[in-house]
Image: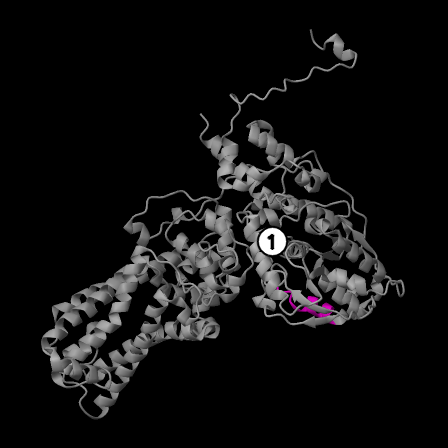
């Protein structure tokens, strides 16, 4: 018996998906920018290739990162992906060794038991059959978890699971049917012939006791083939596209391709690589504090794939970056969201099946039109010359205690500095960027750059992480940019400021733009350790919370903001610290409104501990690290 | 007549202060109300204007713009909106929790839309 009509659905699906994936890859490659094409080529023939293969094995099959985050969820993903992979691999080998001839058609391996029902009675064949049953049991255990998760997500340690659209449901159902139908088909065949190992054999012989196994097997082989075929054909327009897309993504990432600030192949591959695992949903504070459950990154990715208008979703986000940190696929979620913000409202294009399979370039967002801003009223000014300039930032002007503390510290250090926006400065430009208005932001950036350049400074100190991030990333300045916590750390190390030790219990809240956004985790904590008793919270470093006050969210209501802030403050002050310390004026302002614990910026704590009198007036060229800065 | 003689003596001729709701265009205001309901909460206290970064450099009052948008006197708003830097201080000081930043963004959007559909 070499062929049976029931294999046709499977064959159609298989060849369809193979052709589709190849076509898609060619289109993706064609649409890459020239430098990215070169990067990918170089990556493909270099060491990156090995790294990619390793990563594909560890992430696409084993799902190491999901396992790390959540063991049960990871097991579910691993059993389905790795188990299926093993089943195909060992199935092919089995068909090759034990089949009638070598190099069989793919369906021979998949439906091996049907074509070789007498196989596996003794010796090596039986051991091999045992192995195949073991793999099937492994997959089925994961499938059981998946089914339970769909109806009761807490079982796998997830608070929420993703909502699905219709095609996703059909694909999911066909995926769920694949393995049970294989189990039953094999069991009935084994039951009829008295073969099979511990799983198929025992179920088969039990079923054969009261059912006509021979007749029952055939429909289940059909079901098995049909569900495989359906799954393959629906794969490109459902979330299961992540299976091939992730492989492409891993190669691209290891070749050094990054998202950038325009939509392109890489951002598209990333949106397709999202498996909607839902880890970002559980990480999102808007979900668990404010009850906003439709804007999380998994939904954003899905909406982009479906060509929906995502402007509402894209703008309703704190941009805290918690989901970026948690994403097991390593999708650059925040940059993609920023691209959508720049794009604004998408045109509602006609959606049809073809568009689902081949998303056209035109549906990728165009440049957003907006009433051009006009900052002609800004007059050029002549800042005083100084080596060190201090830029407080808008938010710091709203929390004068921070500003005054910094002035006190700077005065005490004896360094020559210039408080460049003492009379109120121009915004740094990041708030405009976060609203997707880059051109306008550029005007402000140019204005500030000129002012900084004219001051002739080699070091720029700022108190606001929002300013810090934009100074570092979007300004092209020949100065060293420091957040005030880094600067204070330097002053302490150089012995320029002396402090008393405050006998106070302090918990540190890491601001999003400073910590996750710019990678400054240690300096603030070292400064706090120097002047007070720093206690650990449950939300350290990469896992830190957002205060909720973020300027990045245009849509959030003040009530929802308050809820996020309230929960975050409660979580951070669970050990009753004397002070909730932060390094951001905006966090300070947001937290002050919702907690009874004293909220203070690090500069305030340092200023309080400061031994006031300048120890000695230094000239800035005298000091080691300041000197290094001058040479920067 | 040119400049009237009375003006030479320190008298001025004031523009009409009537608000003509028939000729005013409330569509911008309606659009913002729909998308950002908190705009209705504004009590025109002027806190936003007092803290404004742009207001530090030039004549710019968000409070005034809010009033003008609500009245439907859009011409002045259209010109002035361009000056906003979206820094967000106004939202932070607002005692009524109005999402003023979004009001400005929405107003810009609304003007773009009304330009598109203008006859």
Is any part of residue A631 visible from this angle?
no
Q: Quadrant of the N terminus of chain A?
A: bottom left
> Residue at horizontal 46%, vertical 27%?
B118
Q: Quadrant of the C terminus of chain A?
A: bottom right
Mark 1: secondary structure: loop
Rendered image coloring scheme: one colour
Q: Nearer the viewer, residue A383 or A570?
A: A570
- x and y, in percent, of residue A518 in the image: 62, 61
Q: Which residue ends up furthest to the bottom in the rendered image?
A: A123
Q: Nearer the viewer, residue A28 or A326?
A: A326
Q: Nearer the viewer, residue A424 or A24?
A: A424
For disc 1, the marked residue is: A549
- x and y, in percent, of residue A144 in the image: 32, 73
Region rendered in magenta: A519-529
- x and y, in percent, of residue A611 in the image: 85, 65
Q: Is residue A490 left or right of residue A305?
A: right
User: Residue A106 is drawn in which quadrant?
Assistant: bottom left
> Residue at horizontal 46%, vertical 66%?
A42
- x and y, in percent, of residue A565 in the image: 59, 57
Question: To which chain does the residue with label 1 belong?
Answer: A
> Residue at horizontal 36%, vertical 49%?
A360
User: Residue A155 is drawn in which quadrant?
Assistant: bottom left
Is any part of residue A594 visible from this angle?
yes
Q: Is residue A536 left or right of residue A141?
A: right
Looking at the image, is A353 positioned above or below residue B55?
A: below
Label 1 CA crowd tier, 10 Å (few <14, some 14–19, many 20+): many
Q: Of helix, strand and loop, which mostly describes the magenta segment?
A: helix
User: Residue A104 is drawn in which quadrant?
Assistant: bottom left
Q: Is residue A22 left or right of residue B2?
A: left
Looking at the image, is A116 positioned above or below residue A372?
A: below
Residue A402 falls within the magenta-colored stretch = no
Residue A525 falls within the magenta-colored stretch = yes
């Amino acid at each position: 018996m070499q062929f049976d009509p029931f294999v046709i659905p499977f064959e159609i699906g298989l060849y369809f998906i193979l052709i589709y994936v190849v076509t898609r890859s060619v289109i993706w490659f064609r649409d890459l920018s020239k430098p990215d094409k070169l990067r990918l080529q170089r990556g493909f023939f270099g060491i990156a290739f090995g790294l990619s293969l390793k990563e594909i094995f560890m992430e696409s099959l084993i799902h190491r990162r999901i396992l790390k985050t959540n063991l049960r969820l990871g097991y579910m993903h691993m059993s389905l992906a790795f188990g299926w992979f093993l089943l195909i691999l060992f199935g092919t080998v089995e068909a090759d060794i034990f089949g009638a001839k070598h190099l069989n058609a793919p369906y021979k391996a998949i439906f091996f038991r049907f074509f070789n029902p007498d196989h596996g009675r003794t010796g090596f064949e039986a051991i091999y059959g045992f192995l195949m049953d073991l793999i099937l049991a492994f997959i089925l255990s994961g499938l059981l978890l998946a089914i339970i998760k769909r109806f009761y997500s807490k079982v796998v340690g997830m608070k929420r699971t993703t909502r699905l659209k219709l095609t996703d449901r059909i694909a999911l159902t066909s995926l769920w049917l694949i393995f049970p139908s294989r189990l039953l088909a094999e069991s009935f065949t084994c039951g009829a012939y008295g073969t099979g190992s511990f799983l198929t054999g025992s179920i088969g012989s039990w079923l054969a006791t009261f059912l006509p196994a021979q007749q029952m097997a055939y429909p289940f082989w059909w079901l098995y083939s049909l569900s495989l075929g359906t799954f393959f054909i629906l794969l490109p327009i459902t979330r299961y596209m992540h299976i091939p897309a992730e492989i492409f993504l891993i190669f691209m990432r290891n070749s050094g391709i990054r998202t950038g600030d325009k939509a392109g192949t890489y951002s598209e591959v990333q949106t397709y690589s999202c498996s909607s695992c839902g880890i970002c949903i559980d990480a999102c504070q808007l979900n668990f504090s404010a009850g906003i459950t439709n804007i999380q990154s998994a939904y954003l990715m899905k909406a982009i794939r479906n060509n929906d208008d995502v402007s509402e979703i894209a703008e309703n986000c704190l941009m805290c970056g918690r989901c970026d940190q948690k994403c097991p696929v390593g999708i650059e979620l925040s940059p993609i969201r920023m691209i959508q913000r720049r794009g604004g409202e998408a045109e509602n294009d006609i959606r049809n099946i073809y568009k689902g399979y081949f998303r056209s370039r035109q549906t990728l967002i165009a440049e957003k039109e907006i009433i051009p801003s006009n900052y002609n009223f800004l007059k050029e000014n002549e800042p005083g010359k100084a080596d060190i300039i201090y830029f407080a930032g808008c938010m710091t002007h709203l929390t004068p205690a921070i500003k005054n503390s910094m002035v006190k510290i700077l005065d005490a250090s004896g360094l020559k500095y210039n408080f460049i926006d003492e009379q109120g400065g121009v915004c740094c430009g990041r708030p405009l960027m976060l609203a997707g208005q880059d051109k306008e932001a550029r005007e402000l950036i140019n204005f500030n750059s000129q002012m900084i350049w004219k001051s002739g400074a080699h070091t720029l100190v700022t108190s606001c992480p929002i300013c810090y991030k934009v100074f570092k990333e979007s300004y092209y300045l020949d100065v060293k940019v420091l957040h005030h916590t880094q600067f204070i750390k330097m002053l302490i190390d150089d012995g320029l400021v002396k402090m008393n030790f405050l006998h106070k219990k302090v918990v540190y809240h890491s601001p999003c733009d400073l910590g996750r956004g710019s990678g400054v985790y240690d300096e603030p904590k070292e400064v706090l350790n120097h002047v007070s008793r720093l206690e650990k919270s449950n939300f350290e470093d990469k896992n830190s919370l957002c205060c909720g006050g973020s300027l990045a969210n245009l849509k959030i209501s003040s009530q929802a903001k308050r809820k996020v802030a309230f929960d975050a403050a409660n979580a951070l002050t669970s050990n009753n610290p004397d002070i909730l310390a932060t390094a951001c004026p905006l966090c300070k302002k947001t937290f002050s409104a919702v907690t009874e614990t004293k909220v203070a910026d690090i500069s305030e704590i340092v200023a309080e501990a400061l031994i006031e009198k300048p120890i000695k007036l230094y000239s800035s060229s005298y000091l080691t690290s300041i000197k290094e800065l001058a040479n920067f | 007549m040119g400049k009237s003689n009375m003006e030479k003596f320190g008298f001025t001729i004031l523009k009409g202060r009537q608000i003509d709701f028939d000729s005013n265009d409330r569509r911008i205001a309606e659009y913002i109300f729909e998308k950002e309901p908190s705009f209705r909460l504004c009590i025109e206290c002027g806190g936003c204007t007092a803290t404004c970064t742009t207001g530090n450099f030039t004549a710019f009052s968000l409070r005034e713009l809010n009033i003008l948008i609500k009245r439907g006197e859009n011409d002045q708003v259209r010109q002035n909106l361009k000056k906003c830097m979206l820094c967000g201080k106004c939202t932070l000081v607002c005692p009524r929790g109005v999402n003023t930043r979004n009001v400005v963004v929405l107003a810009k959007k609304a003007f773009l839309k009304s330009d598109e559909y203008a006859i």
